[in-house]
Image (tube, rainbow, N blue to C red):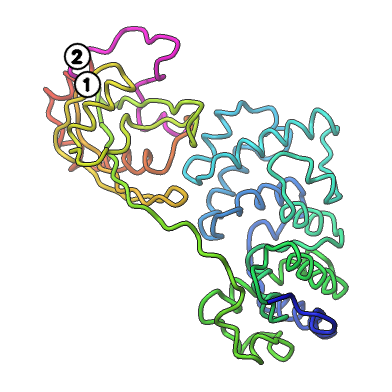
């Protein structure tokens, strides 16, 4: 069905003031809303891409303790930045943020652009992020439509079809711009976000307490449960992985992801995905030869965890393991980088959440006693 036409494209005149009044009474108290520093607002917006607010909050605080200013971030080496980002996922965001910080320092004299069009020239800054930063940090009248905002406006306009389609996107952006006259643009944009997060939710929206209920065409037509009309995402696939915990005293052997990998540069336990019909012990023998040049001998399973990587749902088994023979003293240029890592070292290395969770498991007394002294000695050769 085509987008709404004529007056059906427009929001009621009272929609903006009602939305802003609701936000000032009910908006979420979030740490990045307590600052007017464009750098800190920028960091929050990058972290919030594809990640829930509750997950971001502790990472945001730790990251800013490590890099309190744009200058400190730009001066840092990329591995330091990835280490501070470790566990948050989607590491391309951190790489782009670091590259953009350097670009601002080197080419723009350290001044973050205030206009959305200029912001979009920076790595990792798309339409939404540019609009959010321009409006929240610089009070520019720019729409910032995230998934929450698009859902709210799609329902208010009873907009059929996917909201990201070109004609529908234009309708939504015009509607969002019409709301900006109600007050400070940053507040209005954040009000849309919060209304979608707290009231106009994807499932079972709380229409009775919505400040926009009187002008919501989806509610009037009984369409609030079916709008917006989103395309189905890629069906998740289930995978199984095995990693080897090779110990030398209180240190474990980790390897670094190759440049071609999705999570390049991260340090992790040696291992990978199982092939069809393959047992974990067989997989680790094969994977050890691939990444270390030495087969791995797997023992007991000491941890199992689940993680999601884009559309993949992975069950990871961590197995106590030893090397079938000593590691070569020096790895060739093309060989996987490796190092022995103590738990206290992990904070300085880029790593994923699975690596951290396995280390936490190993720190528990039951896990420390599970590895025999003989196994520890053989693994250290």
Residue that sits furthest to the front in the current view: 1
Quarter of the view holding residue 104: top right
Which stretch appears magenta?
323-347
Q: Nearer the viewer, mark 1 or mark 2?
A: 1
Image point (36%, 7%), residue name: 330
The residue closer to the viewer here, 247 or 267, is 267
Residue 231 vertical position relative to residue 358 in the rendered view, above or below: below
Q: Which residue is mark 2?
A: 325
Residue 328 inside the magenta-drawn segment: yes
Image point (67%, 67%), residue name: 163
Q: Which residue is mark 1?
A: 295
The residue closer to the viewer here, 17 or 233, is 233
Q: Quadrant of the C terminus?
A: top left
Q: Quadrant of the N terminus?
A: bottom right
The residue closer to the viewer here, 180 or 42, is 180
Question: Which of marks 2 and 1 precedes in the sequence?
Answer: 1
Q: Are marks 1 and 2 in contact (CB under 8 Å)?
A: yes
Q: Residues within 10 Å of mark 2 (few under 14, many from 20)?
A: some
Label 1 secondary element = loop
Residue 41: percent from left, percent from top: 71, 52
Q: Please give left or right for residue 201 compared with residue 213 in the image.
A: left
Residue 67: percent from left, percent from top: 64, 37
Residue 365 vertical position relative to residue 180 in the rendered view, above or below: above
Quarter of the view holding residue 300: top left
Label 2 secondary element = loop
- The Cα atoms of the two marked residues, 1 and 2, are separated by 8 Å
């Amino acid at each position: 069905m085509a987008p709404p036409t004529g007056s059906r494209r427009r929001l009621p005149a009272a929609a903006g003031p009602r939305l802003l009044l609701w936000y000032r009474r009910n908006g979420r108290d979030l740490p990045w809303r307590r600052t007017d520093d464009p750098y800190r607002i920028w960091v929050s917006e990058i972290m919030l891409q594809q990640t829930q607010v509750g997950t971001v909050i502790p990472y945001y605080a730790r990251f800013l303790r490590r890099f309190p200013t744009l200058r400190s971030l730009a001066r840092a080496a990329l591995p330091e930045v990835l280490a501070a980002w470790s566990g948050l996922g989607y590491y391309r965001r951190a790489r782009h943020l670091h590259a953009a910080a350097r670009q601002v320092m080197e080419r723009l004299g350290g001044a973050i652009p205030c206009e959305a069009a200029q912001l979009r020239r920076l790595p990792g800054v798309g339409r939404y992020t540019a609009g959010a930063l321009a409006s929240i940090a610089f009070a520019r009248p720019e729409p910032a439509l995230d998934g929450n905002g698009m859902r709210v406006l799609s329902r208010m306009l009873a907009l059929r079809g996917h909201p990201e389609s070109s004609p529908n996107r234009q309708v939504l952006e015009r509607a969002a711009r019409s709301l900006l006259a109600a007050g400070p643009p940053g507040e209005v944009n954040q009000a849309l976000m919060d209304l979608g997060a707290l009231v106009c939710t994807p499932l079972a929206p709380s229409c009775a307490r919505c400040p926009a209920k009187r002008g919501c065409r989806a509610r009037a037509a009984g369409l609030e449960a079916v709008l917006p009309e989103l395309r189905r995402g890629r069906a998740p696939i289930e995978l199984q992985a095995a990693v080897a915990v090779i110990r030398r005293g209180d240190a474990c052997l980790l390897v670094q992801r190759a440049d071609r990998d999705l999570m390049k540069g991260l340090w992790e336990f040696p291992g990978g995905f199982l092939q069809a019909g393959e047992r974990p012990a067989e997989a680790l023998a094969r994977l050890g030869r691939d990444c270390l040049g030495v087969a791995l001998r797997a023992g007991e399973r000491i941890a199992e965890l689940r993680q999601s990587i884009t559309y993949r749902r992975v069950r990871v088994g961590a197995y106590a393991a030893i090397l079938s023979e000593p590691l070569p003293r020096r790895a060739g240029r093309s060989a996987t980088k490796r190092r022995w890592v103590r738990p206290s070292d992990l904070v300085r290395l880029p790593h994923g959440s699975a690596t951290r969770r396995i280390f936490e498991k190993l720190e528990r007394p039951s896990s420390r006693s599970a590895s025999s002294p003989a196994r520890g000695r053989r693994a250290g050769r």
